[in-house]
Amino acid sequence: MKTIKELSDAVGISRVSIYKMLKRDDIKGHVFKKDNVTVVNEIGENIIRAHYSQECVEAVDMVFNELNNETDDSLNDDLMAVLREQLREKDNQINSLLNIVANQQRVQAAQYIVDKQHTETAQKPIKKSFWNRFKK
């Protein structure tokens, strides 16, 4: 078991940071008072070490990502140019397909009108005058 002072020296963080960490639920069961001094058992110490080592890893990752972002700006510009060109090509393809569909719809509408007129004329009975009905 280590006191807060010993733990802060071992981990390399301030006592205030450790006290803030002690408020977390996952560590509360590992903190005790011994002779009016706050102590942390080995499990609590490992939790604190893991937490701050993870923060260090995240900080290193953030710095690494910033460095990559600076060097990748030219690559990003090239990539954006390629993507814009692809979008233009896709827009042209979409417009072409829309024109084809519109033409097909016009042809179908005209064919429908012709078919409708044809069926109407085919279904109309031929009207004979009254006297023509008697002729054979």
Image: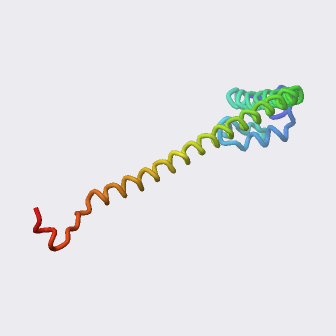
User: The C terminus lies in which quarter of the figure?
Assistant: bottom left
The residue depicted at 66 percent of the width and 42 percent of the height is 25
Of residues 134 and 73, the one nearer the viewer is 134
> Percent from the top left, x then y, of residue 84?
77, 36
Image side of residue 129 versus residue 81, left or right: left
Of residues 115 and 100, the one nearer the viewer is 115
> Percent from the top left, x then y, of residue 115?
37, 52
Q: Is residue 29 above or below residue 75?
A: below
> Percent from the top left, x then y, of residue 62?
82, 31
Res. 55 image quadrant:
top right
Res. 23 image quadrant:
top right
Q: Is residue 112 above or below residue 74?
A: below
User: The N terminus lies in which quarter of the figure?
Assistant: top right
Res. 98 image quadrant:
top right
The residue depicted at 19 percent of the width and 71 percent of the height is 129
Of residues 84 and 133, the one nearer the viewer is 133
The residue depicted at 85 percent of the width and 37 percent of the height is 15
Image side of residue 7 versus residue 43, left or right: right
> Percent from the top left, x then y, of residue 102?
55, 48
